[in-house]
Each structure stands twice: as C-alpha cells, then as structure tokens.
Amino acid sequence: MPLVGVVDSVRAQQVMNTLLEGLATSRATVAILDITGVKVVDSQVADSLLRAAQGARLLGVEVVLTGIRPEVAQTLVTLGVDLRGLVTRGSLQSGITHALQKLRGKPGRAAL
C-alpha cells in the first residue's frame, strides 16, 4: 500500500480501513506499507502507521514498512517511536524481497 502526500487524521483512518478490508479480502500473510511518498512523518503519522500495523497483526498479517529515508528514521528515533514487531526496510524493493522470501513455502499471498 503506497502512501503519498500528507497523512492527517482523516487520511489515517482511510488507510486503516482500506488496509484491513483489503487484507481480510485477500487473505494476505504479508502487507507492505510504503511511505516513500510521505513528505512529513510526525508523531501523528507514526502513531497511525503503528495502529494500522497492529490491526493487520490482529488479522495474522506481517507488516513491512518501507521507504524510510534517513530524515524519517531520525524523526522516528527522536520521537521515540517503538517499531518492535514491525519489519522495516529502506526501500520498496527490499520490502518486496523480504515479503517474497517470507512467502516461499507458505500458503497465502502478499498484499503489495
């Protein structure tokens, strides 16, 4: 699921709804949230991403967060965001590679 632009509270709720409905429909085992196109990651954006990931985990889906640029990583560290339980990759390509490796030999599909 690529995210682009500003993520405010309304958009964060849309992301959550779309992600969870898509995961339930597709029966995916891995979901990729790509934040390459999100210009600003603040505490609100970080919280919304974590809540979406928690919801996905409740459905049995591993979430991979990709597109973490150096300035985003610095912001997340400064904010003290706890990303335990969430796989992170710097690029979408490395996230897809991780998802494909995870899926080898397992039933289900990845939600990209």
Image (cartoon, rainbow, N blue to C red):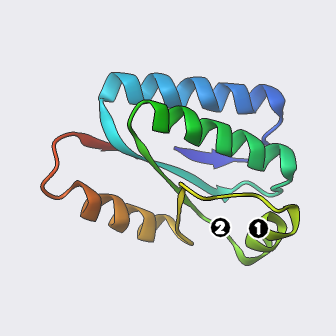
> Can you tell which quarter of the image residue 50 is in?
top right
Tag 2 near tag 1, CB within 8 Å:
yes
Which of these two is toward me, 28 or 40? 28
Residue shown at 68% from the left, 56% from the top: 37
Whole-percent x, y for residue 22 in the image: 43, 27
Mark 2 to mark 1: distance in Å?
6 Å
Judged left or right of residue 89, residue 30 is: left
**Disc 2 designates what residue?**
68
Whole-percent x, y for residue 73 in the image: 74, 71
Q: Is residue 34 shown above or below 9? A: below
At label 1, the amino acid type is: Val
Q: For residue 72, which numbered disc appears in the image?
A: 1
Residue shown at 50% from the left, 27% from the top: 20
> Can you tell which quarter of the image residue 34 is in?
bottom right
Q: Which residue lies furthest to the left in this view?
A: 105
Which of these two is toward me, 85 or 49? 85
Q: Is residue 9 shown above or below 40? A: above
